[in-house]
Image (cartoon, rainbow, N blue to C red):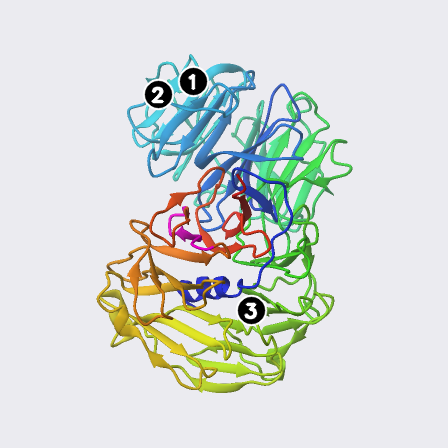
């Protein structure tokens, strides 16, 4: 299914929504569900409740955002986006070093002296990849980049080049300290060690040549390194090695942390969970969460306080587990970690506290306006099996009836307690689904180039022809609450599918008889400056007033904001100037109010039918917005389904 299909499906399922009664806010507020994949953890050297975490962006899987908690993980907030690497001052809890990976300053080393409130760029001659601080001499900082390794002895005020490595550039730096100036550089060709702060380097022999080094940690003369599923240990600084963990235990090593107060105590995060050794790696015990552990932090000021970062995988939301008793018991602490990609959102019109969302881990529901979430299993699918859902439709008359679009079409008639796989009885696996707001037993869907219609809540379907081939994708599919209902269908066309990368033209159709026949209204859009229309929004007060976002997946990416029609799509006029590619449009019950989101995750509001627009940006931290939904009960509240969970904006003055 194309990206355009997915977005339009999500938007058009949200016509009859009711927002949850939350406190008024002057900025975007994250509602969750919370979690994601943590890649790094750093504990404050003074306050065990202060932790920093980098969380991978769900849409890229290689870029990270930086989060901070001051209450042991009970609440998190994002303090920077696009983080490449992170290091803390071992003695000053307010000093951080961070490699910026944003488009504006890629590879710049940034420093904060106030715990991440503000950042300043360091004066280095080249972009850098990684940063490390020396635990034995906190003023000693190392960075590695395209021009080699640089070191500072005054916390970054000045820099001097280190000696060049004998082979290759450094991908990782580990400053071991004890004594100060001992640093390891890992390259694509092996490992090198310096005992004089980078003035000279010597090669470190590894137990397995030609294999990629995984985790690496140092404690005095003990070195630990993993290759594949195996962990090796050296007790003589790397001269000799022996196996410390066999591949049959735990799974593949992902992270390793050594207790600063008890160097023989090791914590190893693996693909199968968390392992602990109290004898320097001779024996291991499984402790803590059973999910893949990607990062581990031990609070320097409280050695019994542990933090384990998880990988979001399958049905598990990932995020953070914390222990205050040395790993005996663990609790998940994710509130504010906005790392889950929510592609589908629906609000229950019969209960303002019920929200439905879906991401790659399956379906979630909140019954308290987003304060908490519960994963909903789709029986007979086992609860442990993730079932990606890309569309949710709630019956506007009987909200206990909900439809899910996945690899099959699912329906519940009891609010999610039990589910029926309609595809098992012959229903198509739909890409798009509409429900008649005046007669919710009537459904329309699109799948595999055909239009499907049902008059009995999806138990039986008839197949109809689409009015065009839509070689270049369907952009919008909507139903107006008229009698009889009016269907709208938009997209982009080309002579052949591969020609869409060179050129395409918009098409737009209307049906007043349930999709049996269609009127071609494409001529009203042909002379406009975009490749194809995207999502369609129907004004709740005037069903002949339509808005479309212009989208482009083609070679020339011709987008032109928002367009509107006051006569049901016969003629069109430009309504959104300089908005670019618009991924979602939502029309409010308040006359003239329209909301739109763009491909670069900006949100705009118009109060004059699209003549002028004002951005609503405060607080929104995401890189992709899939959908917007306005509460018909309280039109001041707007909800966004994003790559960083669900967010809410309250427009109340």
Residue at x-position 44% and y-position 20%: 141
Sort mark 2 into few (<14), some (14-19) or many (20+) by Cα contacts within 10 Å: many
Q: Nearer the viewer, residue 450 or 72?
A: 450
Decide which of tag 3 and tag 2 comes sooner along the chain: 2
Sort mark 3 into few (<14), some (14-19) or many (20+) by Cα contacts within 10 Å: some
Relative image position of residue 268 (x, y in whole percent): 63, 39
The answer to whether residue 502 shows anywhere in this view is yes
Sort mark 1 into few (<14), some (14-19) or many (20+) by Cα contacts within 10 Å: many
Question: Which residue, given by chain and number where applicable, does mark 1 sit on?
Answer: 197
Question: Which residue, given by chain and number where applicable, does mark 2 sit on?
Answer: 162
The span from disc 3 to disc 1 (Cα, nearest Å) is: 56 Å
Side of 299 where 111 appears, left or right: left
The magenta segment: 591-602
Q: Are marks 3 and 1 in contact (CB under 8 Å)?
A: no
Q: Are marks 1 and 2 in contact (CB under 8 Å)?
A: yes
Decide which of tag 1 and tag 2 comes sooner along the chain: 2
Dot 1 falls on a residue whose secondary structure is loop
Relative image position of residue 322 (x, y in whole percent): 69, 36
Question: Which residue, given by chain and number where applicable, does mark 3 sit on?
Answer: 406
Instruction: Give the position of the N terminus as an image quadrant.
Output: bottom left
Residue at x-position 44% and y-position 46%: 623
Side of 307 where 482 appears, left or right: left
Residue at x-position 60% and y-position 24%: 44
Dot 2 falls on a residue whose secondary structure is loop
Instruction: Locate residue 121: give its quadrant.
Output: top left
Q: How many marks?
A: 3
Position above or below: 451 against 279: below
Residue at x-position 60% and y-position 64%: 387
């Amino acid at each position: 299914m194309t990206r355009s299909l997915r977005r339009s499906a999500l938007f058009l399922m949200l016509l009859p929504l009711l927002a949850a009664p939350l406190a008024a806010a002057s900025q975007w507020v994250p509602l969750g569900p919370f979690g994601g994949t943590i890649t790094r953890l750093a504990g404050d050297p003074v306050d065990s409740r202060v932790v920093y975490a980098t969380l991978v962006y769900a849409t890229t899987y290689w870029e990270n955002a930086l989060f901070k908690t001051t209450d042991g993980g009970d609440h998190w907030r994002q303090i920077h986006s696009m983080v490449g690497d992170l290091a803390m001052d071992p003695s000053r809890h307010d000093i951080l070093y961070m490699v910026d990976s944003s488009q504006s300053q890629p590879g710049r080393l940034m420093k904060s002296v106030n715990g991440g409130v503000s950042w300043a760029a360091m004066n280095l001659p080249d972009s850098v990849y990684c940063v490390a601080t020396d635990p034995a001499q906190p003023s000693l900082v190392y960075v590695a980049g395209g021009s080699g390794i640089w070191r500072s002895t005054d916390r970054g005020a000045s820099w001097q080049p280190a000696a060049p490595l004998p082979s290759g550039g450094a991908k990782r730096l580990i400053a071991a300290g004890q004594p100060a100036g001992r640093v390891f550089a890992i390259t694509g060709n092996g490992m090198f060690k310096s005992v004089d702060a980078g003035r000279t380097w010597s090669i470190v022999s590894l137990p397995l040549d030609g294999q990629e080094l995984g985790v690496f940690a140092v404690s005095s003369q003990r070195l630990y390194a993993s290759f594949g599923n195996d962990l090796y240990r050296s007790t003589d600084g790397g001269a000799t090695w022996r196996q410390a963990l066999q591949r049959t235990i735990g799974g593949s090593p992902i992270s390793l942390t050594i207790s600063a107060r008890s160097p023989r105590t090791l914590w190893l995060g693996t693909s199968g969970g968390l392992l602990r050794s109290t004898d320097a790696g001779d024996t291991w015990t499984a402790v803590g969460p059973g999910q893949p552990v990607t990062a581990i932090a031990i609070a320097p000021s409280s050695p019994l306080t542990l933090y384990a970062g998880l990988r979001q995988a399958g049905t598990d939301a990932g995020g953070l587990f914390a222990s205050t008793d040395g790993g005996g018991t663990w609790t998940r602490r994710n509130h504010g970690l906005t790392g889950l990609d929510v592609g589908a959102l629906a609000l229950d019109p019969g209960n303002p506290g019920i929200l439905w969302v879906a991401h790659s881990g399956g379906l979630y529901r909140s019954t308290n306006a987003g304060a908490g979430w519960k994963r909903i299993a789709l029986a007979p699918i086992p609860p442990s099996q993730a079932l990606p859902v890309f569309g949710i439709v709630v019956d506007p008359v009987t909200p206990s009836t909900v439809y899910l679009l996945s690899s099959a079409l699912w329906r519940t008639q009891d609010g999610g307690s039990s589910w029926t796989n309609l595809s098992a009885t012959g229903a198509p696996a739909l890409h798009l689904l509409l429900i008649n707001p005046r007669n919710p037993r009537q459904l329309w869907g699109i799948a595999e180039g055909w239009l499907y219609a049902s008059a009995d809540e999806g138990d039986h379907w008839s197949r109809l022809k689409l009015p065009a081939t839509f070689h270049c994708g369907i952009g919008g599919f909507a139903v107006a609450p008229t009698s009889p209902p009016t269907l709208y269908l938009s997209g982009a066309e080309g002579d052949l599918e591969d020609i869409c990368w060179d050129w395409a033209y918009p098409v737009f159709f209307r049906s007043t008889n349930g999709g049996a026949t269609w009127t071609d209204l494409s001529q009203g859009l042909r002379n406009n400056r975009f490749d194809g229309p995207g999502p369609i929004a129907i004004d709740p007060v005037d069903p002949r007033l339509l808005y479309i976002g212009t989208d482009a997946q083609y070679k020339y990416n011709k987008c032109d904001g928002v367009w509107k029609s006051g006569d049901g799509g016969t003629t069109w006029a430009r309504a959104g100037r300089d908005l670019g590619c618009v991924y979602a449009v939502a029309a409010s019950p308040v006359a003239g109010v329209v909301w739109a989101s763009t491909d670069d995750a900006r949100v705009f509001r118009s109060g004059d039918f699209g003549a002028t627009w004002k951005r609503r940006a405060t607080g929104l931290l995401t890189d992709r917005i899939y959908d917007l939904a306005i509460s018909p009960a309280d039109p001041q509240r707007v909800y966004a389904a994003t790559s960083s969970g669900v967010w809410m904006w309250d427009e109340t003055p």
